[in-house]
Image (tube, rainbow, N blue to C red):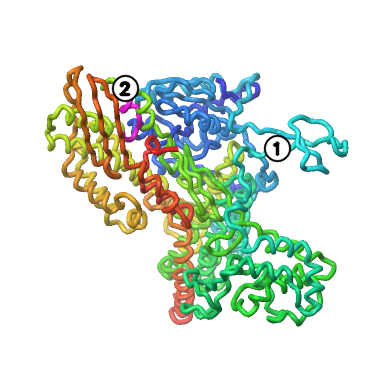
Amino acid sequence: MIGAREGAFTAFRRVLARAMGAQPRVIVVPGRDVAVARGLDLIAAGLEPVASPRHANVLLIVGPLHPQLADAAATLYAQMPRPRAIVALGAENLTPLPPADVVCALSQEGLREATQALQERFAAGAFSETVKDFDAPALAVRVEYTCPMHPEVVSDEPGNCPKCGMTLVPKEAAAAGAHDGHGEKREHGANAAHAGHHGHGHQHGQKAHGGHQAHSGHETHGQASEATTYTCPMHPEIVRNEPGQCPICGMTLISSDSADSPGGHHGAHPEMGSDGSTGHGAHGKMDHSARGKMDHSNHGGMDHSAHSAGTDVPGIEPNFMSMVEMTKDLPASGDGLRMEWIDVPFGPFHPGLPGGLTLTLSLDGDTVAGAGLRGLARAAELQAMLPATLDDLRGALQGLSPHNAGFYVALLDHAVLAALGETTDLTVESAAIARLRLLGDLRWIAGLARLKGAIDLAARAEGLHRSLQIGHGEEIRAQLAQLCAKLQRAPVFRPIFSAKGGPGPTPAERLARMAQDIAAFADRAPAETAAPAHDMTGTGEAVVETGRGAARLKLTIKAGLVTDLQLVTPSQALAGHIAHITMHKELGEALAAVCLLDLDPWEVAQ
Amino acid sequence: MSWLIPLIALIGAIYLLAVIEGWSLGGAFSLARPARAALAMIGQESTKTRKSDALFYQAGPVLLLVAGVLAVAVIPLAPDIILADMATGALFLNAALAYVLVALIMAGWGPNGAYAMIGGWRFLGQFLGYAMLIVMPITAVAMRAESLMTTQIVTSQAGLWNVFYQPLGFVLFMIAAQALIFLPPLDLPVAPGELAGGVEAEYSGPQLLVFRLARFVIILALAGAATTFYFGGWLGPVLPDWVWSGLKTMIIAAAMLSVGRFLPRLREERFLALCWKLGIPLSLINILVVGVLVLVVPV
């Protein structure tokens, strides 16, 4: 086994190895939703799906591994503790991952065989005297060498500093695109004035003592915030051009430049009085009077405790360990609190999101301050293969997305028929499309339920999905209707399915549509069209209603070859709303909002 | 040797609980499952994240286990089967379980990972919600028993179990208990769907085993506390003392483990709002009602 753990295979370790193989804990690439879409039941096959790669000992690759996901999959594998194994179901080229330990067909039968094989692999090779390290390319760290005295001296190789001759010390180079704490996103009100300010606190202090003239810092500050507005600390929607009281709560309005750091350093000195003339025993205080002067009358009700500790103690530097000082360059969030923001990737293999989708959230605490989305943009690959025969195109569409391949193929068939000038039997076709929609709805419900930890609902939706997929739809019609009614009515699920105002159909609309589909669907895939003549020419367009909106395909066929094609899918439009719908939401809520959109990563662009 | 019997009972109960958990999570009922999982974890590497805070990282799960064992120590299985029958038992339980917060924040901070860190801080928020709700119902229980001694609390329920005497307090206590041990639907710090395991996400191998073990110990401590405070501990006809308290504890623990699978996770701010706006007034009412009952109705 390639992912064996180093060590002799002692008798005790044989027992351990057997236990590992008997109950493999798997992490699924690209995700559990894809496994469901492919008709796999992991639990029935004796596998235990887990959420974190650290808890897994098997990397299960479901279907062909998309090149864009390969690096991420390698990172995932590198994060797994050894002994670890790779199972590839219907996947061939895994680079940069090592070759799979078990290769099987992409089916439930294949999954069962793989589980059997895993048992043998672990029992035989979980521990080994000779193991090779695996380094995911994405995790490689570049080391650079720098002089302790001259940080500007940076070299790729060890050596001595050209300035002082000291030995250069190794340091991890920042990864490309590393984050610098969002300093650039929201500059502090009057940054320039500010910096000088704190650097020369002492000087300012003396000036201030001299009767509060010539507050250079203050002057600059005033200029920098010419358009001062006043806002309520509790009700940010109240914005006035003049100082005064909040009409809602009666609190004194604070000026906008201090508003981005309430509790911060202008607001911190009530005891000084508005003229700053009293209580100036310690010089440390002065640096605030300069700035604070214009605001002093305005800080009713703010928290002033932040400041006193560091500044009032004789012999201690002003601002020593001051929270205000340490956080002054950090971005301020909607509530005015300054905190370090972090950029956290969710995906491409996040347990709560569609597999393959990468959502990058800038988190301010646990509140989303910005979002980016990356998908696999497979739809663009279609353009590259033109001109193509209809059979080739059909094959490509079938492999395009594990979630919506059925819709694409139906679109192709309808578009070809339209090009031929024929009409389809609409009642039969819409029943088949309703079934496709239902499958999508069930995966959507299962995904949301997994995200929210409602395991029972997820298992139920996945079970119904399997039955519907293998053509036992008629038998579960009543159960489907029951599930749909439960989601529409049950108070516990209302918080999830009552979201309003998002793009695309609202969850309530989708459930209503689902109820109609349950009554209308039929147990058969969309009809395959008769092979059109090889020399056909024409233009055809088709529209199919998916669960998330309309998908559209326009074809131009010349002499049996498709020369032009335009595919418009609902995910492409919905993806543009990500930043808007997640902004200022709590993390879990933001993830749920993304999940509600039911994006297909295979459609979403980079 | 007085500690040996409770210890064996504890280990047995944990194993049974692990079997129940595996069953409720959708797998088949398998007696071998927890043993296999534990052996597999022992055999795995303990990975370490880059730039982890080694002390916090290593100490988090251990502290969680210590907090759990300390809490279990004051739960009586029978009048004479108890690790430490302290005069301040009920208070000690609280004190021990306060370390759950510390352990989770350490485990969240230690690995230097975003998911874990968010999980750890989420639990700090959750703590603000449940902290009062676990103390105040216990206050009402102690009022009736006129003692903080856990054995005394059990004997005070000879006439009528507290679950009937102060049902409101019982409900509040169970909600707080569910939040304290972050079981679904209040599993915000681990949130498998949102944070891929949160505070647990970066632990693997033996460390993960300690973490999981600690969680079971605390679940047992809380279920044992609920039995002691509300279900009359070992009181019951025919069967021996320890069977009664063991049975009650296991049923409550199983309920705690399985209720979450039917409910979506509660959002943090919603949980906090409920706790402070509704839970605390209700627990004060509970104390008032129990106080009046204690004075007026001698049961």
Front residue of B254/A31: it is: A31
Labels 2 and 1: the sequence-earlier one = 1
Question: In the rendered image, is residue B256 in sight?
Answer: no
Location of the C terminus of chain A (image quadrant): top left
| Above or below for A368 versus B48 | below
CA neighbours of label 1 inside 10 A, class few (<14), some (14 to 19), many (20+)? few
**CB contact under 8 Å: marks 2 and 1:** no
Residue at left 68%, top 33%?
A142
Q: Which residues are magenta?
A: A395-404
Residue at left 76%, top 72%?
A285
Residue at left 47%, top 34%?
A27
Q: Which residue is mark 2?
A: A387
Q: Which residue is mark 1?
A: A172
CA neighbours of label 2 inside 10 A, class few (<14), some (14 to 19), many (20+)? some
Question: In the rendered image, is residue A282 in sight?
Answer: yes
User: Which amino acid, mark 2?
Assistant: Pro
Q: Residue furthest top?
A: A534
- Say left or right for B291 vs A564: right
| Above or below for A601 versus A399 | below
Dot 1: element = strand
Location of the N terminus of chain A (image quadrant): top right
Dot 2: element = loop
Q: Which label sits on residue B22?
A: none
Front residue of B91/A52: it is: A52
Residue A355 in the image: x percent, y percent? Answer: 42, 37
Q: Are marks 2 and 1 on the same chain?
A: yes
User: Which amino acid, mark 1?
Assistant: Glu
